[in-house]
Image (tube, rainbow, N blue to C red):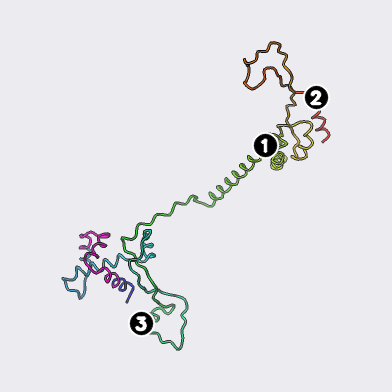
Amino acid sequence: MTNDEIIYNEVNAKYHTPEQRRAILALAYTPEQIAAKGKEIHFKGVPEEQQGEELEKLLLAGLFHTFQEWKKDGKSVKAGEKAAICTKLWKFDDRPRKTSASMEPDALTAAANDQRPDGNYYKAPAHLFHIGQVEASRPAPAGRFKSLDEIKAYNRMLADQRKAAKAAAEQAASAPAGASLLRRLVEAAGPDLEILVGAGVTPANLPALAAETGAHAFHMSGKQVLDSRMTFRREGVPMGLPGFSEFEVWQTSEETIRAARRVLNEL
């Protein structure tokens, strides 16, 4: 028997009543469609009074397929569904056949092998699902990238983000604390850019900063805090920003700047 004949027999052996057949047929056909199918098929050797039943059996068998066959039709088995019918169907194996002088193939196998000398047929377990057990396969998600260049650009962006995040994590409130990051920035800048190192720079830490960062340019305020020359002082009535003393003056120290210059001259 062919696979179609095997499926026909197995299906109609299990779903043998009109009610069982029609319950499944109704999932795929309307009565009008079934009638139209009947006009397309010529039943040879089947009495006219039996042709309606035979039509139902033929159409029913066509609604049972294996998982792979449904997949080819754009459908997939619903989650949790179990095979409606377990049987064995013919499969073709194109691997070289192993023959033995002591084995005589039966007539059916020999005939099949004669038709396809490059392989052989064998029966393998098959699981059949009917149309009520499947649903339209969900389309695969659209590809995020349309070309290799887009993938490369995306990877470069991720790499830049990782570098920026790492740099941000290593940033510090003062130059001495962020010396390792400043060193990398100086190396990355090369001879075309000058990295100006600032924040917390003093004449005392300039030699170490220059050695640790490799920088040649430094920014410092050199400030000193002096007492204001204001004589009338009213606490609680600020004239400037809250949190800053009304009676202190920040001023650049000439001596601090000269000291820093002397250190740089010696580097």
Evaluate if marks 3 and 1 touch, with contact meaning CB atoms under 8 Å apart. Answer: no
Q: Which residue is drawn at 27% across and 60% down?
A: 28
Marks 3, 2: nearer the viewer = 2
Q: Which residue is drawn at 57% across and 46% down?
A: 158
Task: Decide: few, some or many residues near mark 3? Use Cα within 10 Å; few <14, some 14-19, many ≥20.
Answer: few
Alpha carbons under labels 1 and 2: distance apart: 27 Å
Task: Decide: few, some or many residues near mark 2? Use Cα within 10 Å; few <14, some 14-19, many ≥20.
Answer: few
Which residue is label 2 attached to? 255
* In the image, farthest residue toward the bottom: 102
Residue at disc 1, secondary structure: loop
Which residue is label 3 attached to? 108
Alpha carbons under labels 3 and 1: distance apart: 84 Å
Task: Decide: few, some or many residues near mark 1? Use Cα within 10 Å; few <14, some 14-19, many ≥20.
Answer: some
Q: What residue type is labelled 2?
A: Glu
Q: Which of marks 3 and 1 is nearer the N terminus?
A: 3
Q: What residue type is labelled 3?
A: Leu
Evaluate if marks 3 and 2 touch, with contact meaning CB atoms under 8 Å apart. Answer: no
Question: Relative to 78, is 8 above or below?
Answer: below
Residue at disc 3, secondary structure: helix
Q: What residue type is labelled 1?
A: Ala
What span is in magenta? 9-35
* Pick the front one: 43 or 177: 177
Marks 3, 1: nearer the viewer = 1
Which residue is label 1 attached to? 172
Task: Verify whether residue 6 appears in magenta.
Answer: no
